[in-house]
Every structure is written in structure tokens, then in C-alpha cells.
Image: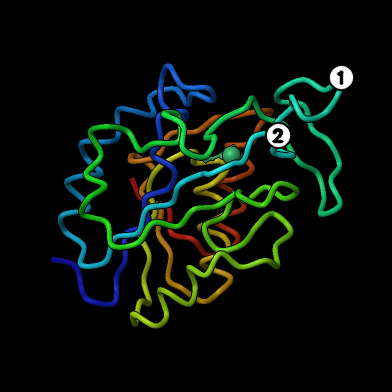
Amino acid sequence: MRAADEALIVIDLQNDFCPGGALAVAGGDEIVGAINGLMSQFQIVVLTQDWHPAGHSSFASSHDGLEPFSVTDMSYGPQVLWPDHCLQGSHGAEFHQDLHADSAQMIVRKGFNPAVDSYSAFFENDHVTPTGLEGYLRTRGVKKLTMVGLALDFCVNFSAVDGAKLGFDVSVDQSLCRAIDLDGSLEAALLGMTDAGVQLNG
Ligand code: VGL
Ligand code: ZN
């Protein structure tokens, strides 16, 4: 068993990010079994769940003439536009059916604000609006975070960097992540995480 001040954060292991889903990440389903095994070693387990309302501003379909995977400028900075995904209450937003979601103690939903995307488990993409996860972890005495899930270069990356900036000791197990890899995003994410002091394992 891991120490009481360690938490496992499983990022967005949802149907839409797995093969057959609306924003499928190659091999996204391959990591579920090993993540279940890791979950059983942690006393504190948190899941994140991408959770968008219809017409969300991160969807290309909400912007006339703009295509999925293009980039647009939002008030808070550049934003990749995605295919519609993880609609609140939809099958695509559900966790992968084999994930032992019942053993998680906390589920953080993010991306519910229609006007702001939220890659990070800690802050929306404006980098200031908190999700509340920091308070949850601190009040439970957590100091060390292990992160796994989807996608390594987006939500795992933003979560890991924010966690490190907040002073948590963060490690990412790369073998239990899969990436979208859009225009060099994976390489940039690995450099950014390393710069932020995130330990990359696996
Ligand atoms: C994610 C793109 C859009 C992720 C979520 O989980 O990495 N990526 N929404
Ligand atoms: Zn999303």
C-alpha cells in the first residue's frame, strides 16, 4: 500500500477518449487493466471526468467555419477546437466500462463552464478558476501525486504542471497514459512537464 499522503489521479478514462469514441486516443483502452491494479495500491484515488454541456466553446461545431483540431483565440488564450465529446450524461462521457470507478473516492468533473475549457484537474483553461481539487487533496493531507490517463499531452500534462506549480510532488507514469499528439504537442508536453519539475516515469 502507498503512504497515506499519496494520491492517484486517473485522468479522463472515458469512452469518448477510447477507440470508437468521439475524440479517440490511440490505445486509450489498453491502459485500463494496469490502472485498476495501480488503483488498488493507493489509499486515495481521484478520477477526473471531462463533462461538457452541448454547444461547448471548445467544440469546433460551436464556431462557424472552423474545423476540428484547428486553433482559435479565446479570451483566455489559444484553444484547440475539438470534435463534440464527453457531453454531460452521454455514453461517451461515461468511464470505460472496465475501469474500477467504484473504488475512487472523488470524481472531479471539469469543462462544464460553456465558455471556458478545462484540461487541468486543478484549474480551468483561464488558469485561475479552481476546480476545488487542490482543497480536497490538501484537507486530506496529500503531498504526492501520481497521474495516469488520457490524454498525456493535454489533460494529463496540464494537470501535472498545475499540480507541480501548486507545490505537490508530481509524477506521471507514461506507460499508463496515451497521447493525442497534435502538431508536436506530445514533445512540447514532455518538455513542459520536465521544466515544471514533474517526474516522468515509465
Ligand atoms: C482532453 C481534449 C479535450 C483530454 C479533453 O482529456 O486530454 N483533450 N478535452
Ligand atoms: Zn474536453
Residue drawn at x 25%, y 39% as measured from the top left: 99
Which quadrant of the render holds ligand 2? Answer: top right
Place of residue 51 in the rendered image (x, y in percent of width and height, measured from the top left): 53, 44
Place of residue 189 in the rendered image (x, y in percent of width and height, measured from the top left): 59, 45
Mark linked to residue 55: 2
Q: Quadrant of the C terminus?
A: top left
Look at the picture and state if 37 lies above or below 33. Answer: below
Query: Which quadrant holds residue 105?
Result: bottom left
**Left or right: 45, with 49 as reference point:** left
Distance from Cα at disc 1 to Cα at disc 2: 15 Å
| Mark 1 closeness class: few <14, some 14–19, many ≥20 residues within 10 Å | few
Nearer-the-camera pick, 20 or 62 = 62
Per the image, the residue denoted by label 1 is 65
Q: Quadrant of the N terminus?
A: bottom left
Q: Amino acid at mark 1?
A: Gly
**Left or right: 128, with 9 as reference point:** right
How many marks are shown on the rendered structure?
Answer: 2
**Left or right: 81, with 19 as reference point:** right
Place of residue 31 in the rendered image (x, y in percent of width and height, measured from the top left): 30, 34
Nearer-the-camera pick, 46 or 195 = 46
Q: Amino acid at mark 2?
A: Gly
Give the mark, 1 or 2, whose residue is nearer the N terminus. Answer: 2
Look at the picture and state if 33 lies above or below 83. Answer: below
**Left or right: 185, with 28 as reference point:** right
